[in-house]
Image: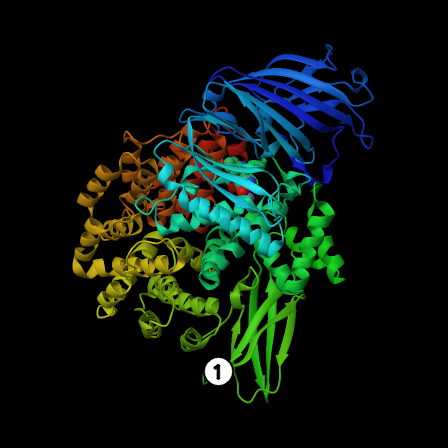
Amino acid sequence: PQTIFLKDYAEPHHWVETAHLTFKLSPRATLVVSKIAFKPNANNLGDLILNGEQLRLVSVQINGADVPYETTDTHLTIKQSDLPQEPFTFEATVEISPETNTALEGLYMSSGMYCTQCEAEGFRKITYYPDRPDVMGVFTVRVESDLPVMLSNGNPQASGDGWAEWHDPWPKPAYLFALVAGDLIAHSDHFTTIEGNHVDLNIYVRKGDEDKCAFGMGALIDSMIWDERVYGRAYDLDIFNIVAVDDFNMGAMENKGLNIFNSSCVLASPETSTDATFERVEGIIAHEYFHNWTGNRITCRDWFQLCLKEGLTVYRDQMFSGDMRSHAVKRIEEVLQLRARQFREDNGPLAHNVRPESFVEINNFYTATVYEKGAEIIGMLRRLIGDEAYYKGCNLYFDRHDGQAVTIEEWIKAFEDVTGRDLTHFKQWYSQAGTPRLSVTEDWADTTLTLTFTQTTPATPGQDVKKPQVLPIMVGLIAPNGDEVVPSTVLEMTETTQSFTFEDLTERPIASILRDFSAPVILQREMTAKTRAFLLAHDTDPFNTWEMGRMLAKDTLVAMIIDGTPPARDYLDALKSMLSDDSKDPAFRALCLALPSQDDIAQTLTDAGVTPDPMAIYEQREELRHTLATEFKDILPGLYAANDAGAFKPDAQGSGKRSLRMSVLALLTLNDGGKAAQTLFETSDNMTEQAGALTALLSAGTGQEELASFYAQWFHDRLVMDKWFMMQVASAAPLDAARIASMLTEHADFDMKNPNRFRAVFGALHGNHGGFHAPDGAAYKLLADWLIKLDPLNPQTTARMCGAFETWKRYDADRQGMIKDQLNRILATPNLSGDTTEMVTRILG
Ligand code: HT7
Ligand code: ZN
């Protein structure tokens, strides 16, 4: 496989004006007839180069006549000398086999329906085409089949018995193409845009799923309203369709006017879905809808610019979710995710720039760095230039580049133009990998507090020398009596070391630093447990309040692991008073009660120069859970009773209460032998509580009867069954995890071709830190066995799951040796896909 470099970008030899496609659908022999109007690119004349893979070519013509051409496994080329100098029409017929397409890229079949996934490079598996995002054409699509529902992008144009035609007036790159055909049912609604246009809205699902669409439809309408109100962006077609598909490599896809969703990211009902699922559905529906402007109307010039659409769209969906729920709670959840996924990536062998400079397989760059760090960059930009300039810059970007395929340069230029600022240094966030470490010292003299910050970024693969980044550091000062004496202010750090002073203070305040997690850095600050407890009680910034509790928990765990120090009293007392404070949001209290994950503790130990012992981490974390259960014995039953949310509503208030109640239940189960959990399991009418009770029981080492009755109740519902598979592996004790995972792969309902099911078992195995790193290496071997089996069927999902091994250098020599052996075994597999080869090679370093 070839490495592609950003620096080599060149415009194509030909632009597409229009594409007419006819699909004669058949499971193993679908005919795709294409008629494409090309225009030579005067800036870069040359051969007609079309991508095409796994196609059986039937015929090719130019302007209705035969023409000489060459084909390889990946391309069809017609020499410039054989082409007209003016615009011309290229026609081809190819045959493809959707039913045998297990890679889930291109046109494939899932539960009897036809569907497509074209981002990033799937369209080339449908027909010959310049499959690159800077080639934008107007598509007209005719679908022929005997299925009742036939959909494509844009507006419906005409239909008859056995056929339907769709026309998309908005020029688009091939990666946004979509087609669906199946026996589907629509949950319908409508929306009138701010411009007065009527839009039909449909969520198409398989029979039996109709009652799981209402929440998603509400989220779609909320998203449409929000994008009009906040960004001034309205929808632009007569119809917006969403289709739920069971077999899907990722969450969802923003195809123009025809979003395709992993059914787990759109279907939701109180009986079958947890609050976390409702929240995820809301966020992903918003994300895909927001792509209509940030991604579709304005797209990426090349795949190196992926963060242009993904980072910005994640930022937009985060703002939306904050508005719909609680900004404070959402921000904490975002940072938890960022640290668990992106910091982990940025501090290991897979670290890469938010805008990478080279890749072998672009599918391997749909990463936490591109998405989540990409979103953090937008947040920092907004903090630095202010809200007004941010929205002005966005408007300028939309007006200037509507209908274009652009780069990060154009995005940044819009903000330079509205602010008059030179953002060259800020732009370095896109081209320097690694997480900055930010240390701080404090000096108090007279009436002045001086904060001196120093930033360093460790080397990452291929980037040894790092420069200082532009860091917006939000700071507030609290007096010893708890009053805030300096409210939040943003310090702009640009140097390696920089001091900031606060004058005219009557007494030495306590600084609250990096409020709202204003920059994606690791803050290294010496603080006593007393100061942390003080800020936990008095800080006005909810993120930092939570952060102080988190640091107390981490310090406690690290001390327990390293030298057996018992849990710190400051931590236990501060946490207890926080939990008992009914004026605080239950969702926030639940986040405070949650202990750092085992993986997070392992990273914290690594950062402190200690080799993590996964068994000690598991045991001490369990020990702390038992200590909390004992220490809070007197308040747990009251908290449990007080946070009964009553009738299920998937809103922020109800889900916050349930979240606290389920965290409390997990501890209560350690005290009452599982009585409360069993009762809740038997009586609850919603999945949040049912799954919460079952997890509490399984984590306490019981719950086998409940597990069996859960299966009997839900075996017919594949999304609930994913939870059944996942919960067993996730809550297994370390020495049981691999055995349980292996046993589940023998279960009649295990289907390795379904990415959700595969992830339910193996994502959970990797997520069970103690189980994955059990001393016998059984989990490493089991995962490697299954990745080797999956690779020929679905390279994209296989490659992504190799990320489970990315932290291997953290651990002791034995574990490193065992993981390395498994990685080498995967790499030595004959005919290993390019996707997996690239990932394993990078992980091995
Ligand atoms: N833009 C999409 C990214 C994507 C994808 C989605 C589903 C299956 C395969 C995929 N490859 C890339 C989803 C998004 O970020 O909105
Ligand atoms: Zn996206």
Colour approach in the figure: rainbow
Identify the residue shown where x is 82% and y is 22%: 86
Give the vertical position of 59 relative to 783 (above or below). above
- Where does the image place residue 451, in percent across and percent down from the top left? 59, 76
- Where does the image place residue 47, in percent across and percent down from the top left? 76, 22
Taking depth in this image into account, of 795 and 539 the one nearest to the observer is 539
Taking depth in this image into account, of 629 and 788 the one nearest to the observer is 629
Taking depth in this image into account, of 828 and 496 the one nearest to the observer is 496
- The mark total stands at 1
Identify the residue shown where x is 36% and y is 49%: 769
Q: Give the image quarter of residue 171.
A: top right
Identify the residue shown where x is 69% and y is 36%: 134
For the N terminus, the image quarter is: top right
Give the vertical position of 13 relative to 191 (above or below). above
**Residue 443 visible in the picture:** yes
Q: For numbered disc 1, what is the local secondary structure?
A: loop
- Where does the image place residue 273, in percent across and percent down from the top left? 34, 46
Q: Give the image quarter of residue 440.
A: bottom right
Give the vertical position of 388 relative to 448 (above or below). above
**Residue 377 visible in the picture:** no
For the C terminus, the image quarter is: top right
Q: Pointer 1: what residue?
A: 483
- Where does the image place residue 226, in percent across and percent down from the top left? 55, 53
Taking depth in this image into account, of 768 and 301 the one nearest to the observer is 301
Identify the residue shown where x is 32% and y is 40%: 720
> Could you classify mark 1 by the number of other residues whose Cα lies within 10 Å: few (under 14), some (14-19), or many (20 or more)?
some
- Residue type at mark 1 is Asp
Left or right: residue 747 compared with residue 165: left
Left or right: residue 333 compared with residue 376: left
